[in-house]
Structure formats: C-alpha cells, structure tokens
Amino acid sequence: MTSDFLPFALPEIGEEEIAAVVQALRSGWITTGPKARQFEADFAAFLGGAVEVIAVNSATAGLHLGLEALGVGPGDEVITTTHTFTATAEVIRYLGADPVFVDVDASTLCMDVAAVEAAITPRTKAIIPVHFAGRAAQMQPLLAMAKKHGLRVMEDAAHALPTTCGGQLVGTLGSDVTVFSFYANKTMTTGEGGMLVTRDPEIAKRARVMRLHGINRDAFDRFTAKVPSWYYEIVAPGFKYNMTDIAAAMGVEQLKKVRVFAEKRAQVAAWYDEALAELPIVLPPHAAQGDVHSWHLYVVQLAQGVMVSRDQLIERLFSQGIGCSVHYIPLHLQPYWRDTYHLIPEMFPVSQRIYERTLSLPMYSRMTQADVNRVSNAIKAVLN
Ligand SMILES: *Cc1c(COP(=O)(O)O)cnc(C)c1O
C-alpha cells in the first residue's frame, strides 16, 4: 500500500487506545477481567442502562449465542435478508436450523417487511433484520409482525452503532437480542470483538454461560464463600467466545469517541452527497426523518444507462489508488447458500439489481474533504 493509496476503510486509533492496551498488558491480567467488565458497564450506560450486555470476541459469536439462547435448533426456520454478510446466516446453520432468505426494500436496502410476512411458515422461529450500512431497518412494523406471529427478533447491528430508529438507539428497540460488531472496519473497533445486548435476563444468563464453556458462573459466584476457588460446574457444552481485556481496553476508549466518529462519518457522507449530486449515480438511502445513520458504509449505485460497468469503475478507481468494495455479493449468489437452498436471482430481484450496479466508496472517520473530492473527481473522469 503506497502512502497515497486511499483505502476503503481505516480504523481511528488514538494514543488513548494505545495507552489503555499497554496498561492492560502491564497489569498482568490480559484475558477477560476488569477491562471487559468496565467495557460492558460503559456500553450498557451508553444504551441508557436498562439492558444486559455481554462482550464477546466477534459479532458472529454474539449472533450464535443469541440464537442459541432463543432456543433455535434443528427443524426451525429463521428469516433473514439475502443482502448481508454470510455471518448473519451461518449462525443459523451452526444450530442446525435453516435460513429463509428474503429480498430487500430498495428504499432502505434492509429486509422487505412484506416479504418477511410472506415467508412465515409453521416452522418459523425468529427473524434477523440487518441495519444495512448503518441505516435502521423498519423495526416498528417488523416487531409488530413478530409479535403477531409469536416470533423472536435478533437484530444484526454490526453496522449500527450509534444508529437510531424512531428516535431510539438500536439496542434499545424492544427486540429480543441485538448484536454489535467491533471488527476492524466497523464504526468502532476492538480489533476483533462484539457485544450482545438483551433486556431478557434469561437470555443474558444463558449467553453468559455459553460464552465460556458452559461454566455456570452464577452457581460459582453464589457459593464462592463455601467452596474452594478451583471449583466450577459445567452445565452445557459451551463455546469459547469471551473478549480479552486487551480488546476491551481498546473498546473502553473507542466507545468514548463513537459519537465523534459518527459525526465525522456523517460529514463525509454529506460531502459525498454534494460532490456526486450531478453524476449518474444513485446516492445511498438516508435515515428516516429525525434519525441517526451511523454511515458504516457509503454505498452508491450506477444509474441505469451508464455505459461503464460497476466492475470497470472499481478497476479504474483502483488504478488511481482508490480502494472500493461491494456490499454485498448477495447470499443467494454464494455457492453454499445457492446450492443448499436452491436459490436463484429471480427470487431476489431488488438485491440482484442492486448487486449488479453497486459499489461502496471509501468511508472512515479520518477522511478529509480533499479525499472525498479525489474520489468524486476520479468517478467523474471515468463516467464522462
Ligand atoms: C461485520 C459483520 C458481521 C460479523 O462481525 P464480526 O465481528 O466480524 O464477527 C455480521 N454481520 C454483518 C452485517 C457484518 O457486517
């Protein structure tokens, strides 16, 4: 990577994160401990306090724990969107259940609520909406429908910190589980990491036990006065999904900055909107009136009739030192999902159409207006 390559994404790590990690390393306690506990407390406070939060080593781990705690298992169906990362759906297979994919709504790029209702069968157990790019899915109608049909809802909020929906932060909307990601390119990062959020104490209890080998911490803590410190009980074949204190130390500092990061990303999005306004490009959907879009991604589509293909545009931008990406290659086109569930593009016309014309432009908090102009000028040069 040359110094004048403009990458698609970059984390913003300050001296505060570096000092906090060094402090964790020097403390002698590097796995799950006081920093992880502090990160969880700070995250719960960020969401307003009335939630239980469980730090994990990835959002994928959190999604797995969430579905497991909801009791999803073999024979169950879970409805999700084809226009997402494979992690959203793979956790359904981890539990032996089957994903049922639905198309997206062109105005939000999130799951089409009517398509979800049409996909419900007697086997349907849960719905996993994805807040695509950081714009909230249509949660009010989804939650109402889930309630009507007795279905559980787990939000894949990997893109959605600090997204709001109806004026409320994602994580506080009334679903059963919400999972955030702190992967390197997300709106805040711990290198690798995630956070499971729930208001249901039973889900929280199960996820905590399954996060670390199925060790029953409650029993452990309750009787610590009576039994020696080496004693523990295994109540289930759990997983190894705990967050290290090294990662949590970063998370504590990143969380303090997440609002500032979001403001910077919103500024970058506004610069793009203006710079691209006159081009034959479909700009990304904005948040509903009064809501916050976290702008994890800035996703555009080439307008109909443009002579340059999406692939050619990405190649030309790359040759000028600009990194782009595609979100997403829909799951219905991925060999495993396509072949296992006999999926064809005609089942997902909106996602398919978007996929063929979409690209994600560089988007990260440290981008300057000059960076945005460089990207928009390069696009202009290719399209004209
Ligand atoms: C990044 C991402 C995930 C997985 O996050 P990890 O923390 O890398 O496990 C899940 N779903 C979506 C939509 C994502 O973008």
Image (tube, rainbow, N blue to C red):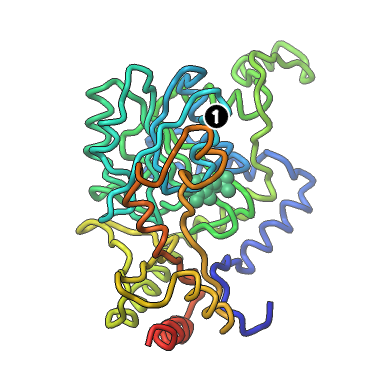
Which residue occupies the foreground of this view, 373 or 25?
373
The part of the image, by quadrant, that contains residue 82 is top left
Residue 22: x and y in percent read: 73, 58
Residue 99 appears left or right of 16: left
Residue 296: x and y in percent read: 44, 60
Tell me which residue sits at (69%, 50%) in the image.
Answer: 246
The part of the image, by quadrant, that contains residue 346 is top left
Residue 71: x and y in percent read: 47, 19
Single out the residue that lies furthest toward the left. 289
**Quarter holding the N terminus?**
bottom right
Residue 325: x and y in percent read: 52, 65
Residue 294 appears left or right of 53: left
Q: Is residue 39 visible?
A: no
Residue 186 appears left or right of 308: right
**Quarter holding the C terminus?**
bottom left
Say what secondary structure mark 1 lies in: helix
Which residue has dot 1 on it? 93
Tell me which residue sits at (70%, 14%) in the image.
Answer: 233
Tell me which residue sits at (29%, 35%) in the image.
Answer: 116
Which amino acid is tagged 1? Arg
Which residue occupies the foreground of this view, 36 or 383?
383
Q: Residues within 10 Å of mark 1 (few under 14, many from 20)?
A: some
